[in-house]
Amino acid sequence: MQELIRKLLAEMGEDPAREGLRETPKRVEKAYKFLTSGYDADIDQVLNNALFTVDYSEMVIVKDIDFYSLCEHHLLPFFGKCHVAYIPSNRVIGLSKIPRLVDVFSRRLQVQERLTNQIADTIREKILPLGVAVVMEATHLCMSMRGVEKQNSFAVTSAMIGAFRNSARTRMEFLELIKLRSAVPGVRESIPAGLACIED
């Protein structure tokens, strides 16, 4: 990978041998290996048997999970907040495992829509809940740094499964509860969702 980065720097018109860039290929390789480490992750090892039989059938929510990913169309970052809810049937998952699942799937080349579905589908498969809901809000640098150059737009995606899809009341309860998060500086609740990253 380091040799490819050197060639890329040269194609950009830079001198890969100059002092400031000499160690760049090594740093970039290390960064990309971390940012794509989700490919090597084993979901069962991540969960690490943190599934518990509990007599609880109300909504469980973990919200405001920070995530960072790379757009597969431009290899530019997109990042934001993820909110996850599920209604147990007879098993719950350790709360810290949900952010870990978000990390596994976000540390791959992604589009936000697929990332949202992967998180929801994995929770459904592993604990067989009555319902799963995932909402992701993200800023895409491929929209703000290039292309349409809209710095204040952000994309919102959702996956609703089971009770969250079938019951408007359950779905609205979840959406109302995640609105209670502390306001993100510079982001108003009334700002509409932007467009998800599209290849161009």
Image: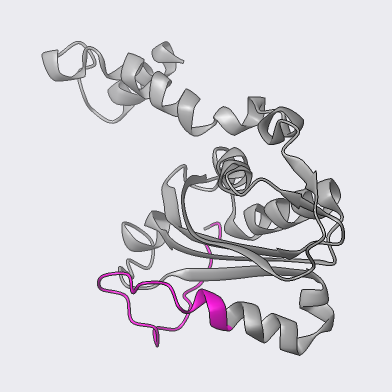
What segment is highlighted magenta in the picture?
Answer: 176-199
Which x, y percent locates residue 23? 25, 13
Relative to 102, say whether 193 is above or below.
below
Which x, y percent locates residue 16? 24, 16
Which x, y percent locates residue 42? 71, 28
Q: Quadrant of residue 21?
A: top left
Pick whichever, 160 or 148, lies toward us.
160
Q: Is residue 84 left or right of residue 189?
A: right
Prevalent SS, magenta region: loop
Q: Is residue 84 magenta?
A: no
Residue found 40% across the figure and 26% down from its top: 31
Which x, y percent locates residue 95? 61, 49
Pick whichever, 69 or 163, lies toward us.
163
Pick whichever, 114 or 88, lies toward us.
88
Count of numbered circles on the image? 0
Relative to 59, say whether 10 is above or below.
above
Residue found 87% across the figure and 55% down from its top: 128
Residue found 32% across the figure and 72% down from its top: 152
Residue found 64% across the figure and 30% down from its top: 39
Q: Is residue 18 left or right of residue 140?
A: left
Q: Tell me, what colour scheme is on the image?
A: one colour
Q: Is residue 180 magenta?
A: yes
Q: Residue furthest left?
A: 19
Q: Is residue 172 left or right of residue 27?
A: right
